[in-house]
Image (spheres, rainbow, N blue to C red):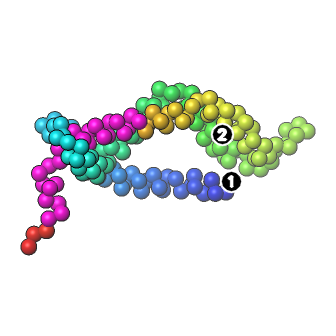
Amino acid sequence: MAQVLEIAMKLPEKLRGLRSERLSSLRPLGEFFDHQRISRPKDTNEAFQRVTYNTRHFSGNYAVIVLLLTIYGMIMDTLLLVALVFLVGGFWAINRFAPEPMQVGEHMITQKSLYTGLFVIGIPLLWFASPFGFMFWLVGSSAFLILMHAAFIEPPVSSEYTGVETV
């Protein structure tokens, strides 16, 4: 339990690091949606080269696409959103308002019993919400959009000379 709380405490720091790392590489929308650079690759080798270059070049933009698809999917799957809010809110409320055992009538209510109740209600609710279906949808839709964009956008001419050193 202590490990879970330790990971949860480090999460905002890791998110800030991820945000500064990934979002610093955001490319302008004009470059990302440049319709003049759209063309069909000649063969699979060219498509693979484009995907390799564009996934590195537009990695920040692709991270934003995955984030937007996640938000859209969570809004559309309200049962999953309710289940996650219930579980996360329950963890937060138990840690915030019930750190010590409480006497209610003749019963002693401990943090352990509150967590047990949270899991007894929250895990079946989460299972019924089908998080695996959501994850498969998110991976599939993200992969489709990113790979299609990366395969059909031509890299700039300057990308062909990135590995060449001048003497």
- The alpha-carbon separation of the residues under discs 1 and 2 comes to 15 Å
Query: Quick one: SS at disc 2?
Result: helix
Q: Pick whichever, 97 or 34, lies toward us.
A: 34
Which range of residues does the magenta coloring cover? 140-164
Q: Is residue 87 above or below residue 6?
A: above
Residue 15 in the image: state x and y as whole percent: 45, 52
Q: Which residue is mark 2?
A: 90
Side of 102 relative to 35 (left or right): right
Task: Indicate yes or no whether the magenta region holds residue 156.
Answer: yes
Which one is closest to the eye, mark 1 or mark 2?
1
* Residue 114: mark: none
Q: Pick whichever, 122 or 150, lies toward us.
A: 150
| Furthest residue toward left | 167
Query: Quick one: SS at disc 1?
Result: loop
Q: Is residue 29 visible?
A: no
Of the two numbered discs 1 and 2 on the same chain, state the one appearing first in sequence.
1
Side of 62 relative to 34 (left or right): right
Q: Quadrant of the C terminus?
A: bottom left
In the image, what residue type sits under mark 1?
Answer: Met
Q: Which residue is mark 1?
A: 1
Q: Pick whichever, 94 or 127, lies toward us.
A: 127
Q: Residue at x 58, y 36 (%)?
A: 84
| Furthest residue toward right | 106
| Furthest residue toward bottom | 167
